[in-house]
Amino acid sequence: MNASEVRPADPAESEPQAAGPVAGRGALLRLMPMLTVANAAMFMVYMGIGVVLLPVQVELVDPANKVANFGLVSGVAAIFATLFNPLAGLLSDRSGRRNPWILCGGLAALGALALLGAARTVLLVTIGWCLVQAMMNIYQAALTAVVPDRVPVERRGLASAMVGIGTPIGSAVGISTAALFVPGDVTLGYLVLGAIIAGAAVLFTGAVRERKRPTVETVPLRKQLAAFADTLRSADFRWVFIGRFLMMLGFFSVSLFQMYILQDHIRLPEGLDATEAVAFIAPLDAGVTLLATVLGGLLSDRMGRRKPLVGLSCTLCAVAMLVPVVKPDWTGMLIFTVVMGLAFGCYMAVDTALVTLVLPSADDAARDMGVLNIANAGPQILAPFLASLLVGAVGYDGLYVAAALITLVGAAAVIPIKSVR
């Protein structure tokens, strides 16, 4: 998965003006619900596999080394996805169309998922998951560009909301769906999720037609790197970048290993296994996070202050991470889920608002938001390797404590910001 899309940036911010022919009123009415469907299907695949099917498959291949192997598979795939996503976006930019890439990416993902489901060694699982990432990033990169391509500026807030709704819905439904195939036929679970993404691609491209856009002039890599350096010269933006990076590193270090934590660390009630626990937690987490996102954004607007809420949210995340250390049972895990969901949802809403207030250049907002997405993507590359090393060295308690400390440092990163209260 391209890490920048786990908690996706607002599509309304991805490009200041429509780059091609915008959709008419009738087309917009068809496009809006399809944005939710297409994004929900994408997160069903990412979360259903990443949280349930992939860790189960890695464990089946080599139970004794599951933590180290899962960290390796996840980390390598995250690197691959991060590098492949801009390439996939470049291909759709140059073609002047999005629908063919969405359709081909979704259909090819079905084939890649079938191959992944049949893998029986760590090497083949790694290759298969990278191949799935490649196909899903073709789908994802083109889908992400649909809003700035086709939605007028005055309707992008609604479009962003329709995209955002798909994230918690897809995550919860994807995890619950994947759990139905454990401990039974994991391979069938891959095929079902593959059929869902392929069906969503067919439905989207069939319901939402497009006209060819003007081809976009590509920016040389040297200029992109120079722009990145220019953006980070802004002290306030640099501190926001550091805070986001640390918060995401702490969050993903714990969340990526949730299945193994429930198996090996948490005392579950009799009759409840780790897969059922994950399926129960997923909708609870999605609902609490969505509620906190809305309330956090409204509260920060009413207060007119962002820094205190960002710092408080990071601190609350750190506190939540200590709950399973003190109370490693099912009750503790439920408390952790609720508190973490409240904290993370509020953080994402308020920190995103904070980012928009410290952008170095109003004329280069899309570029600067792209730089910030590195703070979302980078931690997902580092987190699997870091977490697997910590679990091997100091166990799951040590992992939780380290993640809590990382998020606390992230909370402190907002203190030096001067231009925003």
Image (cartoon, rainbow, N blue to C red):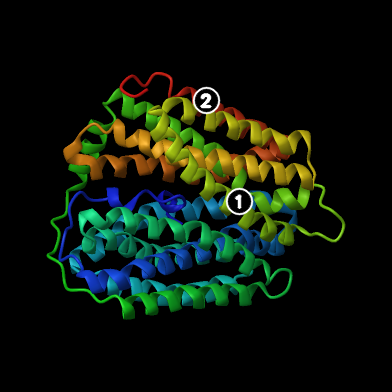
Please say whether residue 132 is visible from this viewpoint.
Answer: no
Residue 310's disc number: none
Q: Residue 360 lies in what quarter of the image?
A: top left
Q: Nearer the viewer, residue 252 or 288?
A: 288
Question: Which amino acid lies under the numbered mark 1 shown in the image of this protein?
Answer: Asp
Q: Nearer the viewer, residue 218 or 200?
A: 200
Q: Residue at left 38%, top 62%?
A: 137
Q: Position of residue 366 (x, y in %)?
A: 24, 45
Residue at 31% x, 37% y is: 356
Amino acid identity at mark 2: Val
SS at mark 2?
helix
Residue at image coords 49%, 61%:
43
Residue that numbered label 1 is attached to: 285
Q: How far is the residue under mark 2 from the one under mark 1?
A: 24 Å
Q: Quadrant of the C terminus?
A: top left
* Residue 409: image tag: 2
